[in-house]
Image (cartoon, rainbow, N blue to C red):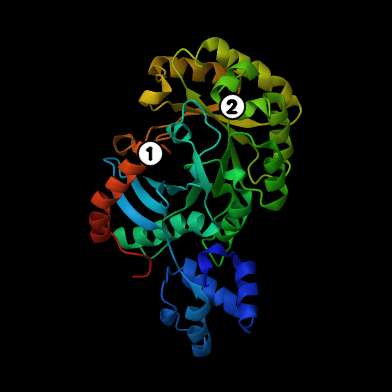
Amino acid sequence: MTVNLLDYDLEGLAVFCEGLGEKRYRAVQLFRWIHQKGATQFDAMTDLAKSLRQKLPLAARLTGPVLLSQHISADGTIKWLFDMGGGDAIETVFIPEEDRGTLCISSQAGCAVGCRFCSTGHQGFSRNLSTAEILGQLWFAEHFLRRHLQQSERVISNIVMMGMGEPLQNYAALLPALRVMLDDHGYGLSRRRLTVSTSGVVPMMDRLALDCPVALAVSLHAPSDSLRDSLVPLNKKYPLLELLDACTRYLAHAPRDFITFEYCMLDGVNDQLSHAQALVQLLRQRTKQGLTCKFNLIPFNPFPASGLLCSKPAQVQAFAKVLSDAGIVTTVRKTRGDDIDAACGQLAGDVQDRTGVGQRMFRQRRLMTAPAAEAAMSVPGA
């Protein structure tokens, strides 16, 4: 049984190479070929010893995600749908901006948290992704985009673990993936440009702070436990004050001097000025204890099963003003890719609902999209 080399961070790849009787420096060479050059064939790795190139196909493979479809938004956002096998699919989104290129990566097929405003959560949970399946999204996207945009330099400058799933509930696979993203022999990202978003898995926030502190975004969405319980069920296990304590602890290790709080604006649910004022009161005491934060207000992207509506633009601006007037840095997220269902909370909502009907719809969609996808795309290094 061969191993997928996308499952390894550099240390893991060094151990693998030693198992083949090779020096550890060979792992660095191999790592660069995989991640910096996007190679898929061992014969193409010309600075590896011929003996190693002969050993590798017998013990290892480079297997990226299977593409089902690609959609390009009018604003340049690109969404890829990947087949994970067993009727599961995940989506990955690239968001181009003038000063950066951001990739939104999934960590699970489905999600177990079940936030009321998230279409992915309404699908239910299927399984965790492997490290190779997490990294494979970046590996595919980076090297496709270089060819697509005719660039030789790195295209993806920022990564957000904000796709399908709760990253901190898949910690064992997430951690080596983050290390590859940060490694100078891999993708060389700054810790400030790599963000993990969590709904508030407090014990794993503490572990991440010690193991691999990167930028942290926390899905807050409510100023009180009673309201947050109804929107983010995980709050019943890790309530607000416990979550805010974990955020304060994280800042002692974080590459940024603030935590980003994400707040989905829901009409008549959590968007009243009284809610904004309650947030100010909630955070005022925490600020004295060392918690600094930014707010990112997210216009809700409606889907039928939610029973929710997006807050009106004027209400969003009024809400933002209350926070800003209290000295809290506040931005309103610009919706990107909503014409291809790539906006926040929309990922794969029409692909898989964990029911028999959903399974049949997915198989039909795969049959329809795979040939077109294969014609449109090629694998890294091809």
Classify residue 310 as left or right of residue 278.
left
Please say if the residues under marks 2 and 1 sit with CB atoms less than 8 Å apart: no
228 left or right, relative to 162: right
Instruction: Give the crowd class for mark 2: few <14, some 14-19, many >=20 residues within 10 Å.
Output: some
- Give percent across and percent down for residue 336: 36, 37
Q: Nearer the viewer, residue 149 or 379?
A: 379
Of residue 328 and residue 246, the one placed in the foreground of this image is: 246
Image spot of residue 166 (x, y percent): 55, 40
Considering every residue shown, the one lying at the far front of the view is: 356
Residue in view at x 36 percent, y 24 percent: 304
What SS does tag 2 mark?
helix
- Check the image and report above or below for 206 versus 280: below
Which label sits in the foreground, 2 or 1? Answer: 1
Q: Locate the C terminus and report the quarter of the image it occupies.
A: bottom left
Real-space CA distance between mark 2 and mark 1, rounded to the nearest whole angstrom: 26 Å
Q: Position of residue 169 (x, y in %)?
A: 61, 43
Query: Which amino acid type is shown beneath numbered disc 2?
Result: Pro
Q: How many marks?
A: 2
Q: Is residue 24 shown to the viewer in this render?
A: no
Amino acid on which the number 1 mark rests in the picture: Gly
Residue tagged 2: 233
Q: Which residue is mark 1?
A: 356
Q: Is residue 50 visible?
A: yes
Disc 1 on helix, strand or loop? helix
Task: Give the farthest residue toward the right.
Answer: 289
Residue at 58% across, 74% down: 28
Q: Earlier in the sequence, mark 2 or mark 1?
A: 2
In the displayed structure, does residue 101 sit left or right of residue 12? left
Picture coordinates of residue 110, whole percent (x, y): 48, 41
